[in-house]
Amino acid sequence: MKNYQTARGTQDILPKDTRKWNQVEDVIKQICHVYGYDEIRTPIFEDTSVFKRENDSSDMVNKEMYSFSMNQKDSLTLRPEGTAGVVRSFVQNKNYANADLPYKVFYKGEMFRYERPQKGRYRQFNQFGVENIGVKSPYIDAECIALGYSVVKSMGLNCVKVLINTLGDAQSRIDYREVLVEYFKEHLDGLCGDCQRRFVQNPLRLLDCKVDKESEIMKNAPSLQDSLSVESKQYFDQVLQALDNLQIPYEIDDRLVRGLDYYTDTVFEVVSTHSETGSQSAVFAGGRYDGLVEYFGGPQMSGVGFAMGLERLLLLAQAEGIQLDEDDSFDVYVMGLGEVNDVPFNLATMCRSAGYKTEFNPTTRSLKAQFKTVDRKNCKAVIIVGESELANNQVNIKFIETQKQICVDIDKIVEVLDAQFEEKEHGHEHGEKCECGSCNKEND
């Protein structure tokens, strides 16, 4: 019989882990909300041309895309990144006509890239990202970095640093391209095959090579800073000043070019400095793009954004010893003793309707066996349904932490649970003078 396993580069995210994912996603939603970013959900696959644009030299486009065709005419691709789909949607839905630009959205979901799986890197992975489209401003660049930095800090990550660079405006890149071509044409034989391809397609991407990055050829390459226009330098200086005002520390890395061809001006990468992260140190990265809206048929508009891998974020949190929410406890467990028929089920339904996380015993088991389940599920309260109590329309409730047990009428169960859990939450007997909202109602 075949032993079925997950496909290479994929994983099951089991219930014990999804609680951590939910906590991370709650942090993301909260921070995006205060920054004024709304959620967008784009299709999981797009026309291949959405991602494969003209003479793109990136590894993602040339090596890593999952593309398929349902006929001999149309080619579709599982999304390898989020920005292109968001910008396509921006143009298709004519959001550029909105009077209140910039258009500010965030996304989260699965992406797909065919690359060598390793720790923290999967072929199906999850990304959170933001896009701010329609207005070009150094303050928006800084806001974008600050949003991602807030997510990282809210997660408790401390071992991080911001790397930042500028690719300059169109003329700056044209001038720099000529300088790079002149320099690298004398060193092509000493570079890897990918670099020789990039030399033809986009010489700027040579600086992103992972194979030759430590070679003397790369270390001695001309710096983009020497080819920047006055306007580009001023723009970049304003971005840095805005980060200084926000007290976000950064390092200028003049070899940082990012992995996708559509970036212009500001590019950035936030990396972990923790010793255990190794090659998987990137936390989030992004930059500004000036030509993407126009490529998809919209007006000439600039945008800026970043993407953050959620698997990577969880891995870095683990490396720093951050304990995410692992609470798997239940509020209430309903156990039946003897011939009590469907009463445990009905009482569990009543407790759930009142908002209590509740489990019940659907089988005939001993009291001892059921209390072992109570321990394993970390239940806070147990409703014990016995035949003699049930004859009087009553049940016993036992509170595990205090071992307090009381007999109550069935129609008073929720009232008793409410009072007990409020007492534990606020640290006093319900009704004593307290500033909390629920107790103030009674005090009033």
Image (cartoon, rainbow, N blue to C red):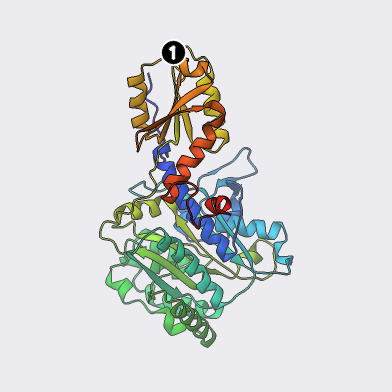
Left or right of 332? Residue 373 is left
Q: Nearer the viewer, residue 168 or 106?
A: 106
Quick check: can you spot residue 12?
A: no
Left or right of 83? Residue 154 is left
**Residue situated furthest left in the rendering:** 275
Choose top left, top right, bottom left or bottom right for residue 32: bottom right
Judge the density around disc 1: few (<14), some (14-19), many (≥20) Cα neighbours within 10 Å: few
Residue 241: x and y, percent?
Answer: 47, 82
**Residue situated furthest top in the rendering:** 339
Quadrant in the picture for the C terminus: bottom right
**Residue at the image position 31 percent from the left and 74 percent from the top:** 219
Left or right of 364? Residue 216 is left
Residue 236: x and y, percent?
Answer: 49, 80
Q: Nearer the viewer, residue 392 or 261?
A: 392
Residue 17: x and y, percent?
Answer: 40, 42
**Residue at the image position 30 percent from the left and 66 percent from the top:** 190
Residue 157: x and y, percent?
Answer: 36, 61
Please name the residue that numbered disc 1 is placed on.
338
Left or right of 244? Residue 129 is right
Q: Nearer the viewer, residue 183 or 42?
A: 42
The answer to whether residue 226 is above or below residue 199 is: below
Choose top left, top right, bottom left or bottom right for residue 184: bottom left
Q: Is mark 1 on a helix, strand or loop?
A: loop
Amino acid on which the number 1 mark rests in the picture: Gly
